[in-house]
DNA sequence: CTTGACTCTATAGCATACTTTAGGGTTTAG
DNA sequence: CTAAACCCTAAAGTATGCTATAGAGTCAAG
């Protein structure tokens, strides 16, 4: 699979794919005899993961760490992996709970704010958050 | 409340506070007779919201939009607010569901990966995501 | 056999979100 | 009254994550 196909499959710009390679987010692909990059199908799921992780606020470096989770004799012990995944799980739980707060505030605005003729209560995200009792 | 106190209260750098002001994320505070900024307590909750929204991947511009939600005679109609909050709610639901997928993959690694002596199955985030059937 | 679409490397530029620097005034404790 | 700790503006610099440009080779169709 050449870079153009990978790009249209994943919706990630060709330049960005080369950039990700330079940052070691995706492994260096084989090359065709003419020097063109020749990607394996596995790369697609890596890139889809990168897109999703970026969406929810992980940096490229954090994503690299997530992709590097592995237990190998010479690199990472079980203990390290357990510890790292726990830290990341805590982070993710925190993110989910913050998103839920923002969600309930927005829901409140969406549902009640425009009930009457310009009823002004809970019309700002901050007041909707403050009054949230869930 | 002077800028230093606001900074230590919120954990946001003084320079960053002035930057947020310049980007109109927080409103311009009153000034003391000596020209020092004099913040009201309201600013704290705005800044806490900014921190949380940043954490979950909103840009400063998106955060500004969220903070600007208001139904006012001359600016935003109910319809606009309804539409905008719906779009943001969809985005947030998407983020939550992506976070949950990553969470369940990490959980799987955390729980099963180190069960035996370097059992190698599901030890990468991608294989844990692929095998996820929830 | 050439033209247009594709690929390559290397480098420069850009948007976002800070962060630091320079140069200066203000306040407060000793 | 001075030194440390605080505040001010304006402008330059930095890190991250792309995005565009230049200059060149490759390939497939007509």
Image (tube, coloured by chain):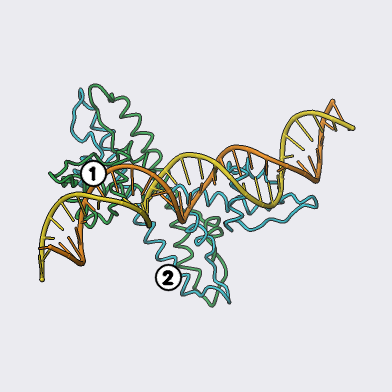
Chain colours: A cyan, B green, C yellow, D orange
Per the image, label 2 sits on a secondary structure element best described as helix
Residue at 58% from the left image edge and 76% from the top image edge: A74
Q: Where is residue B60 in the image (x, y as percent from the top left)?
A: 36, 43
Q: Which residue is drawn at 37% across and 39% down?
A: B61
Residue behind mark 2:
A83
Q: Position of residue B1 (x, y in %)?
A: 15, 50
Callout 2 crowding tier (Cα within 10 Å): few <14, some 14–19, many ≥20: few
- Residue at 33% across / 36% down in the picture? B65
Q: In this view, does A27 lie to the left or right of C24?
A: right
Front residue (pair C25, A128): C25
Q: In which quarter of the image is residue B12?
A: bottom left
- Residue B27 sits above or below residue A40 on the image: above
Vertical comparison of A69 with D26: above or below:
below
Protein chain holding label 1: A
Tally of numbered discs: 2
| Image coordinates for residue A8, horizontal then vertical, percent | 63, 40
Nearer to me, D27 or D2: D2
Residue B29 percent coordinates (x, y)? 20, 41
Q: Residue at x 18, y 47 (%)?
A: B36
Residue A35 visible in this rendered orientation of the protein: yes
Disc assigned to residue A129: 1
Sort mark 1 into few (<14), some (14-19) or many (20+) by Cα contacts within 10 Å: many
Does residue C5 lie above or below B107 as drawn? Answer: above
Q: Is residue A87 left or right of residue A101?
A: right
């Amino acid at each position: 699979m050449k870079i153009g196909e990978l790009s249209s499959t994943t919706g990630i710009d060709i330049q960005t794919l080369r950039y990700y390679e330079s940052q070691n987010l995706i492994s260096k692909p084989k090359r065709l005899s003419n020097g063109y990059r020749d990607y394996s199908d596995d790369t697609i799921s890596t890139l889809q993961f990168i897109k999703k992780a970026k969406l929810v606020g992980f940096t490229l470096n954090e994503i690299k760490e997530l992709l590097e989770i592995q237990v190998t004799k010479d690199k990472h012990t079980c203990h390290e992996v357990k510890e790292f995944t726990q830290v990341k799980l805590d982070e993710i739980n925190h993110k989910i709970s913050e998103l839920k707060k923002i969600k309930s505030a927005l829901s409140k605005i969406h549902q009640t704010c425009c009930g009457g003729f310009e009823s002004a209560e809970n019309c700002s995200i901050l007041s909707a958050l403050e009054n949230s009792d869930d």
